[in-house]
Image: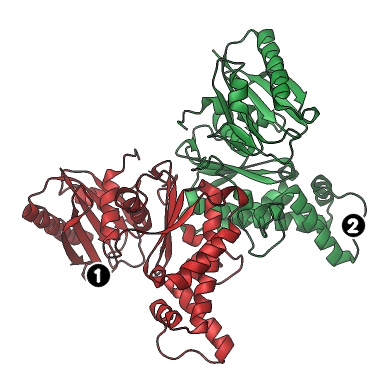
Chain colours: A red, B green
Amino acid sequence: MAHSIGIDIGGTNTDMGLIDENGHIVARRNLPTNKYTDFELYISDLARELKAMIAESGAEIDGIGIGAPNGNFYTGCVDNAPNLTIKGNLNFEQALGHYFNVPVVLSNDANAAAYGEYVYGGARGMKHFIMFTLGTGVGSGIVVDGVLVHGSTGAAGELGHSILIPDGRPCSCGRSGCLEAYTSARGIVQTYCELYREAVGTDPEGEITSKLIGIKAHNGDPIAIETWRLTGHWLGIAMANAVNFSAPEAIFLMGGPAQVGEPLLEPLQQSFNEHTLSIFKGTCQLLMSQLKANEVAILGAAALVKMKVKK
Amino acid sequence: MAHSIGIDIGGTNTDMGLIDENGHIVARRNLPTNKYTDFELYISDLARELKAMIAESGAEIDGIGIGAPNGNFYTGCVDNAPNLTIKGNLNFEQALGHYFNVPVVLSNDANAAAYGEYVYGGARGMKHFIMFTLGTGVGSGIVVDGVLVHGSTGAAGELGHSILIPDGRPCSCGRSGCLEAYTSARGIVQTYCELYREAVGTDPEGEITSKLIGIKAHNGDPIAIETWRLTGHWLGIAMANAVNFSAPEAIFLMGGPAQVGEPLLEPLQQSFNEHTLSIFKGTCQLLMSQLKANEVAILGAAALVKMKVKK
């Protein structure tokens, strides 16, 4: 059976994986994205690494899937991703297509993660679900009737930038009150610092990260516990709102901050139940991604190859 | 060419229409829904009227489409619609299917309106759009990749009950802060009364309706103008949020309160522009429904017959 290639393009590293038909990563390689400013050189090195990985395995390849920030499914381009050292409108589909005689499919990283869950993870067999990814930002990928929603522009599924609280916190996107401003790693740190200042009267000492706030919560720190309660409260509203759109069977959650577990998941489930419209109550499960944190990006990218959608 | 039947089931009246292939209503009839408490009797009278209308026209029929509050596409049932005198779980698809040898398709009224716009109105040729209907409530219908989104339950597309302002105004659904609590006819009246009390110190005299507030705005009443400005502001946020989901080509607006025109549409467009995420700016038009107010419900219902979707 043919294998697929999955490529996860991050600002620091480009991770490559060779995935067999059962969703197992049988080989991995990587390339330091941030060493490059020239797109052609980067693509040529990327192609060389891929060809070496394929040759070593002796596998046949059915396609190459790429997940990237700002990746556009329709154009095959990454458009001015702020965290890449290679600037401009990068047509990965075309550039990599020169080196390989198989389909090259590109989407944004959260869409890829959602599709990975669909092909290889906990969403197998589902027709309607939504994936929320918590990290530096808040991403989402939406599957409706078994098809990843790309919309008219190729960039649909940006629930992290739905306005949760009008005129609320400034968001990195330049607007105010987005979900991302509250439930990204940065938003969680901001909540903690605000609560700390309110309770203690000074800024907290040392570097505060969402991971540290997780450890503090598990150690019983009331400010950290309240931080996660608020995060779950906000995320639960956003998820309940998303249900109104596509009535999914499940909403999946993944990403670093979600790893904290109970301190987030309990208030999240409670808020979700409380804010779900009555006709949808009990129809949509909240689930954690079933893919491993260090595999989901590559599996998601490889899953794009399985997408049977005309552009 | 075959004609289609469209049925709009309202709490007071059941409107029926015979629609030709060009989307013209060539015959209409109606039945007083609120005279009935017995479902079988109602269906038998409805079938008799339909058969008479068909016989009179001599047309061939390719199907019957029904739009109804709480209508569920998958089950063909109307489940406990609060505004119907006929109670219970009403299987229209099965009941009417006994009388006719053509497909019977049912969906909720806002979904039907969206599909009517798609088949007969301004959304012809679009693959991604969303319809917002303002009225007693706020409904919505969503088309993704040319398919009406029904979700896993058959009841997707309830954007009127997305929470716009957490812990905001009480909504008729029992929760707080829904879009409907702000931009339905009732919500608009509430905004006016709140602003009036703030400015004048007493409740406004006489019966206040959204239509009256529209007339007042056109006459230069500053409280009415501010009411519509706020309504547009809120609706613009909700529409910008919806764009994040499915990146539609257009968002359509219809319903009584939308008829006010400029006083709503100008602040709406402004708020929509202001709250749209940068990557979607300029990609989604705000448009008024192109179907006539007194025809959209029947045309939308008839359009459901054209839906080529497996349940």
Which amino acid, by three-letter code, is at mark 1?
Asn
Residue at the disc numbered 2: B204
- Which chain is indicated by disc 2? B
B193 left or right, relative to B311: right
The foreground one among A281 and A233 is: A281
Number of other residues with Cα within 10 Å of mark 2, as a class: few under 14, some 14 to 19, many 20 or more: some
Residue A69 appears in the rendering: yes
Residue at the disc numbered 1: A34
How far across and down, in percent of the image, does residue A59 sit? 10, 48
Quarter location, residue B155:
top right
Label of residue A257 in the image? none
The alpha-carbon separation of the residues under discs 2 and 1 comes to 64 Å
Have a look at marks 2 and 1 and say if they share a chain.
Answer: no
The foreground one among B39 and A44 is: B39
The foreground one among A283 and B308 is: A283
Quarter location, residue B103:
top right
How far across and down, in percent of the image, does residue B291 sit? 65, 32
